[in-house]
Amino acid sequence: RAYLVEVILLEHNADCGGREHAVNICSVAGNPGGVIRVTGEGSSLLFGNAGGTEQAVLSIDGGPDSAFEQDGGEVKCLSTSGKLSVYLGQARVNDGIFKLSGGTFDMGKDDTGEIRVGVCGSGTLEVSGGSILGCRGITLAQNSSEGGVTTNVFRQTGGIIEMGQGGLGVSQASDPNRNSSVELLDGVMVGKRIQGGGGVAPAAATYSKFYANGGTFRALDEGCYHKQYPFVDGFLAMELGPKGLTLDIRSRCNVTQRFTNRVGETGRLFITGSGTVY
């Protein structure tokens, strides 16, 4: 079956509940309250054409309440050799929020689509349930903020995120205006590595921080050892809570990150799996 390939600029609320909607580019731009919702088991937001090569985009780039929200159904890239990329907060003065609490968000077959949390602006990625599949990686603070102060947050409290070779990283960790934090409180992330971007702090406002209190990061089976890009490294602070962080290691991995307790908490680090940590 052929699906629509069209450009839709959504400047007001749009619900995809209990029905099918097919697009190639889906965007909230310039509207502080613009929201795209995929809700209910019978709903679907489909990108591209079956057998096609389209490069699909979901862009949330409005005001502080502009968001994509999914609590059921499916979002899927149909293109055989294309990809679905997600951009949150592309412009410096804009914001973008992505919330997944249920359903499936499938970015493509070959793990080529990326989620960029705060391209030049501020971005928030929250996953409390459901699954993100076919994602190459998640990047916070993709580009320079061009002079404005931005905040970028990735918080996982449930569900599963399957990432490919890109893993989880912070690009502009040394930019004094690009504040990025990761919170893994429950659920499972699968990927190649966790990179904080070096953790350089030229000003007090700058941070690339990670807090874990009950989640799991599972290494890809094909190996995560790399001298230049270790499996876990580069955060200014990686704090652990009483529920701790579980590293599920399936192969040879190097961890150079220094772990600390969060103030007032006794942190824990669990190593599971058949692999080896260096």
Image (cartoon, grey):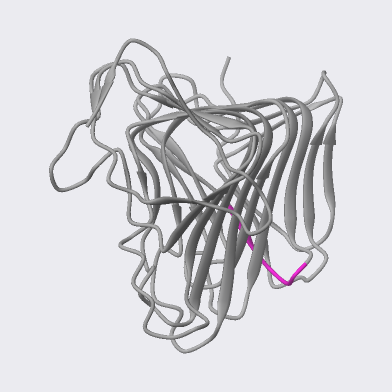
Q: Is residue 192 above or below residue 67?
A: above
Q: Quadrant of residue 176?
A: bottom left
Instruction: Answer left or right for 243 relative to 278.
Output: right
Q: Locate the C terminus by quadrant.
A: top left
Q: Is residue 202 above or below residue 155?
A: below
Looking at the image, the residue that sits furthest to the bottom is 147
Q: Position of residue 121 (x, y in %)?
A: 55, 72
Looking at the image, the residue that sits furthest to the top is 274
The residue under the point 60% across, 81% down is 93
**Residue 63 forms part of the magenta stretch:** yes
Q: Is residue 225 above or below residue 96?
A: above
Q: Position of residue 26 (x, y in %)?
A: 62, 49
Q: How many marks?
A: 0
The residue under the point 80% across, 42% down is 37
Closest to the observer: 37 or 236?
236
Q: Position of residue 102 (x, y in %)?
A: 75, 27
Q: Locate the N terminus by quadrant.
A: top right
Q: Quadrant of residue 215?
A: top right
Q: Quadrant of residue 160?
A: top right
Instruction: Answer left or right for 74 relative to 86.
Output: right
The residue under the point 66% across, 38% down is 242
**Residue 49 forms part of the magenta stretch:** no
Q: Which residues are magenta?
A: 59-64
Q: Position of residue 60 (x, y in %)?
A: 64, 58
